[in-house]
Amino acid sequence: MQELADAVRAQLEEKEKQKYSAVKALSFKCQLVAGTNYGIKVDTADENFLHLWVSKSLPHENRPLVLAA
């Protein structure tokens, strides 16, 4: 899950208009639909926790990861 958190970090920082010194994945859950949706709880190293929702498309669609919320 850390790989997914790292992959959407730039999207997160752009969306929140804030730079994070760290984004450490702590836990996750996933939902299989037409692709996979991941809920990832991350620690931003400044005593804040964020819940990210990341969508990963099916392999044949060849789309980038999307930070949904």
Image: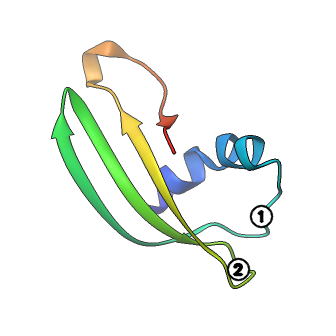
Find disc 1 in the rendering and name its residue.
20
Residue shown at 36%/34% (left/top)? 56
Q: Left or right: where does residue 16 sit relative to residue 19? A: left
Residue at 74 percent of width and 49 percent of height: 16
Residue 9 image point, x, y percent: 65, 50
Determine contact: label 1, label 2, CB under 8 Å: yes
Establish if 46 lies above or below 39.
below
Q: Residue at x 70, y 80 (%)?
A: 45
Q: Position of residue 32 (x, y in %)?
A: 16, 41
Specify few, some or many for label 2: CA neighbours under 10 Å numbering under 14, 14-19, or 20 or more. few
Estimate the x, y position of residue 61 in percent, counting from the top left. 32, 14
Identify the element where label 2 is drawn: loop
Q: Of helix, strand and loop, which one carries label 1?
A: loop
Residue at numbered disc 2 = 45
Residue that lies at the very extreme toward the bottom in this rendered image:
47
Q: How is the image coloured?
A: rainbow
Name the amino acid, label 2: Ala
Name the kind of residue labelled 1 in the image: Tyr
- Looking at the image, residue 54 sits to the left or right of residue 37; the answer is right
User: x%, y% of residue 55?
Assistant: 38, 37
Comparing 67 with 3, the one in front is 67
> Left or right: 61 with respect to 13?
left
Which sits earlier in the primary sequence, circle 1 or circle 2? 1
